[in-house]
Amino acid sequence: MSARRPARRTARAAAVAALLAVAAVGCGDRGELEGAGATPTAVSPARLWPDLRPASSPAYPYAVATRETVKGITVPGDDIRKVDPADVVRAEIAAHPDDYGPKGAYHTTEERMGECRPGGVRARCPLLRAYYRDLTGDGRDDMTLGFRLYPTNQTAVRVYTVEKHRLVQVLADNDAIIGVELAGRALIERSPAGIAGYEYRTTWTWDQDRRAMVFSRDEFLRTGKGPHGRAPSPSVSGSAAPPPSATPSPSASPGASASGS
């Protein structure tokens, strides 16, 4: 993922300044209001190059929505919680062997998946615990799982739903990830940035038309102390799509599968 140029939010800063000015207005000795002085005027966005010709091709696609029926996996009673996450990962590796290194190679994800079976070395199993939440809005739980990729040490994040008695993958993303969150019907990935005190946050939301989780927001955030020891306040940049549905959904609950590590 490439860093995006920080956006200048002048209007927001002006609004905050105005609120602070209002809060600073106090009562006089005789119960009268006193002015706090002039406040900055909000500045509207300035449109640059109004005669700029449209691009001859679409912008580089950040991510293409993933939608793929998982072969070889059954869903008993259409209950996704009864699906073994380890079997799902093995089915993906079998369907896309070229994405997971040479078959039989040492220290690959496929080789380490053998440690997820009973009697295996749990510390070497790349599969992470599965989580369940309704991300598609159909009233049923969907499955979010992750597993480590070797030898790159990236993390694969996958989301699955059930449609017409079949397991369908609706999100597939690989990245250097330091955290994943579920918020409403959105999945947020946090990744390290090459600058101290910053990180990337990528948001994926359910798109009813494409029947998949699609990229909706890319942020470059200040999260801690910068190179000079100061702790800056967060700033947001990137592109944003309409926010995910505000319809309440169940809280994420960890899977009880013994496949998690």
Image (spheres, grey):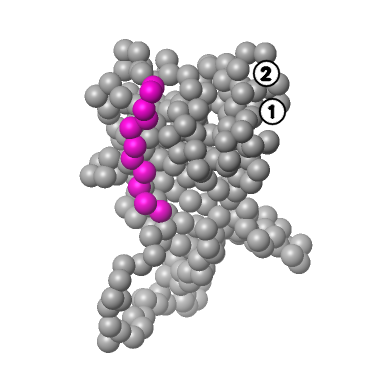
Q: Is residue 126 visible?
A: no
Q: Position of residue 244 (x, y in %)?
A: 34, 44
x and y percent of residue 20 in the render? Answer: 51, 63
Whether residue 93 is visible, yes or no, is: yes
Residue depicted at 46% across the width and 56% down the height: 218
Residue 44 is marked as none
Disc 2 marks a residue whose amino acid type is Gly
- Is residue 71 toward the left or the right of residue 105 in the image? left
SS assignment at label 2: loop
Picture coordinates of residue 173, whole percent (x, y): 47, 45
Indicate the position of residue 132 as horizontal and vertical percent values.
Answer: 44, 26
Q: Which residues are magenta?
A: 63-73
Residue 124 - label? 1
Q: Residue at x 36, y 18 (%)?
A: 74
> Looking at the image, which residue is at 50% across and 66% down?
4
User: Which residue matches tag 2?
Assistant: 120
Q: Report if the CB atoms under discs 1 and 2 are less than 8 Å apart.
A: yes
* Real-space CA distance between mark 1 and mark 2, rounded to the nearest whole angstrom: 8 Å
Q: Is residue 141 above or below residue 60?
A: above
Q: Neighbour class for label 1 at 10 Å: few (<14), some, many (≥20)?
A: some
The quarter holding residue 137 reads: top left
